Image: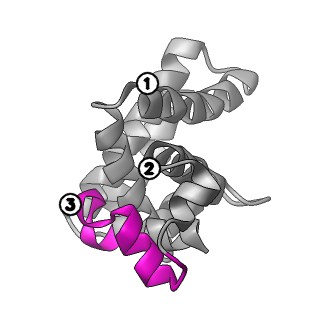
Amino acid sequence: MLLDTGITLIGTVGIRQASARAVEDASGVPHGSVRHHFGGQSGFLAALVQHVFTGDQAVDGESTREVIARWLGTDRVRTRARYELMLLATRDEELRRAMVGHRDRYVEGLVDGGLPRTEARQLVAALDGLVLDALLRNSDGTDADHDPTPLLRAFR
């Protein structure tokens, strides 16, 4: 419950407004619950990163285009939270390591599929740029400008 509430708050009001106390209040749990369950704010943020990436994974049979449409549709708040956490990770070494570790799992999946590692990293970054642009333009990802198919073809 705390993780889902944290993602929702971060994805709607931003990381600065989503303090441990705000998450606890919104969850209806006693103050100190974040510290009790996660050891404090840094443990909670690391758990949030894990939670975001777990929810971001493709489900069986889901194409890249369908994943991006989900990220920009039903999971839009989660996607905004992921980008908030990514930006925070640029200033927090522990969080950066967690974020890079999760992103590298996507890279490894592409490498396992035959893509060279450098190109796999570039593709993950390019897809991030595509999704971020769609968020900025308030696109649901179904328009031609945010169709990942040409980008994916460029990396084959």
Mark linked to residue 90: none
Q: Identify the residue shown where x is 49% and y is 74%.
A: 5
Mark pair 1, 3: CA separation: 21 Å
Determine whether the residue tagged by mark 3 lies in a helix, strand or loop.
helix
**Percent position of residue 89, x then y:** 36, 36
Give the crowd class for mark 3: few <14, some 14-19, many >=20 residues within 10 Å: few
The one of 96 and 68 positioned closer to us in this rendering: 96
**Percent position of residue 51, x then y:** 60, 55
Q: Amino acid at mark 2?
A: Gln
Comes first in the chain, label 2 or label 1: 2
Quadrant for the N terminus in the image = bottom right
Q: Identify the residue shown where x is 79% and y is 59%.
A: 60
Which one is in front in this view, the residue at disc 2 or the one at disc 1? Answer: 2
Which one is in front in this view, the residue at disc 2 or the one at disc 3? Answer: 2
Determine whether the residue tagged by mark 1 lies in a helix, strand or loop.
helix
**Percent position of residue 77, x then y:** 40, 70
Q: Disc 2 designates what residue?
A: 41
Q: Amino acid at mark 1?
A: Gln
Q: Amino acid at mark 3?
A: Leu
Residue furthest bottom in the image: 28
Q: On the picture, is 100 further left or further right than 141?
A: right
The one of 114 and 48 positioned closer to us in this rendering: 48
Mark linked to residue 122: 1
Q: Identify the residue shown where x is 53% and y is 78%.
A: 30
Comes first in the chain, label 2 or label 3: 2
Q: Disc 3 designates what residue?
A: 136
Q: Is residue 20 above or below residue 120?
A: below
Quadrant for the C terminus in the image = top right
Q: Identify the residue shown where x is 58% and y is 28%.
A: 101
Q: Which stretch did the figure color magenta?
A: 11-30
Mark pair 2, 3: CA separation: 28 Å
